Amino acid sequence: MAEITKKNLVLTFGTGAGKEVKITIAKPKEGLASGEISSAMTDIIAANALGEDSLVTTKVSAKYVVQQTEAITLA
């Protein structure tokens, strides 16, 4: 049985309107420190890079989402 593991980094930002905007980064660089992630999120906010209806204004969370898939061999 083949096993596939996917790891994504999900960054969640808050808007001035009280909503959330998420960015999912597939295959993030290994070994990122929390300070590096926080700094990148700060840069994204400062650049006004996200938000159609309302720009992001705060950092809400950052997390790794790991998905493991195992194929089943059918007889």
Image (cartoon, rainbow, N blue to C red):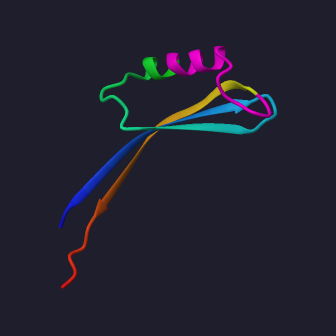
Quarter of the figure with the C terminus? bottom left
User: Residue drawn 69% across and 32% down?
Assistant: 14
Query: Going by the image, does 35 lie left or right of 54?
Result: left
**The residue stretch that appears in magenta:** 39-54
Q: Is residue 8 on the magenta stretch? A: no
Image location (x, y in percent) of residue 65 = 43, 45
User: Residue drawn 59% across and 20% down?
Assistant: 44
Farthest-out residue, bottom: 75
- Rendered view: 46 above or below 63: above
Residue 20 falls in image quadrant: top right
Image location (x, y in percent) of residue 30 = 30, 29
Quarter of the figure with the N terminus? bottom left
User: Residue drawn 43% across and 18% down?
Assistant: 36
Image location (x, y in percent) of residue 34 = 43, 23
Viewer-closest of 9 and 35 = 9
Query: Going by the image, does 71 lie left or right of 59?
Result: left
Image location (x, y in percent) of residue 29 = 33, 28
